[in-house]
Amino acid sequence: MRFDVCLFNISYLCHINEYQKILYMKKFVFSLMICLLAGCGIASAQLPAVSLKSIDGKAVNSETLNNDGKPFIIDFFATWCKPCNRELSAIAEVYDDWQEETGVKIIAVSIDQGQNINKVKPLVDQNEWEYEVLLDPNSELLKALGGQMIPFVVVVDGSGNIVSKHSGYTDGAENELIEEVRKLLAK
């Protein structure tokens, strides 16, 4: 009798283990699907709604940024950030060619605060940057997009979907940006 009871208990435990395996598998698949869906959501996320100001003091909602159906690049910078200024100057050298070829637009967003905010327009004028320049003195848009350091660049497709984000700058990195834009246009 005891032998039969042991066999029953072992088969019962095996049955529970199989059942638990199925439950774990279902949980795993469900979790994987959630992660994949969340990943897709990030890849095609829209710009968040943050109040900014133009360099002339006009209110601008980040949610309305666009380039008439063409890709655009948001480049966060500060007047005191040397890599940021190198990046924006490097792009300025090829910006006319980029616009002619792809129609891409650069939106430079300064995170300067307080006294430094008054240095933005002179820096832009001095460098003859032809970008649309916006002010984000509390870094609200930068934070909302997941940026933690500058320079921080966001590439947005013609439909307003965020397609990539980059932090930091090394010489020549602007070539990678235009390649991303070309790939978007080729789709």
Image (tube, rainbow, N blue to C red):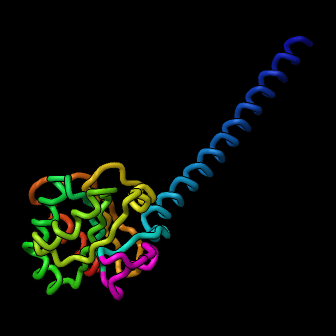
Q: Nearer the viewer, residue 153 or 25?
A: 153
Residue 38 higher or lower than 177, as above or below: above
Identify the residue shown where x is 71% and y is 31%: 17
* Horizontal side, residue 24 vs residue 41: left or right: right
Q: Which residues are magenta?
A: 56-70
Report the magenta stretch's main SS: loop
Which quarter of the image is occupied by the C terminus? bottom left
Q: Quadrant of residue 184?
A: bottom left
Q: Residue at x 13, y 53 (%)?
A: 170
In the picture, residue 181 is in which quadrant? Answer: bottom left
Quadrant hosting residue 163: bottom left
Left or right: 116, with 46 as reference point? left
Q: Is residue 72 visible?
A: yes
**Is 115 left, or right, of 37 in this rendering?**
left
Name the residue at the top extreme: 2
Residue 179 seen anywhere in this rendered image of the structure: no
Q: Nearer the viewer, residue 142 or 167?
A: 142
Q: Position of residue 186 (x, y in %)?
A: 26, 80
x then y, percent, for residue 150: 27, 53
Quadrant of the snapshot with the N terminus: top right
Instruction: Please tell me whether residue 27 is drawn above or below residue 69 in the rendered image.
Output: above
Near-viewer residue (95 or 36): 95
Residue 24 painted magenta: no
Residue 11 x/y as whole percent:
78, 27
User: Nearest the camera: 97 or 112?
Assistant: 112
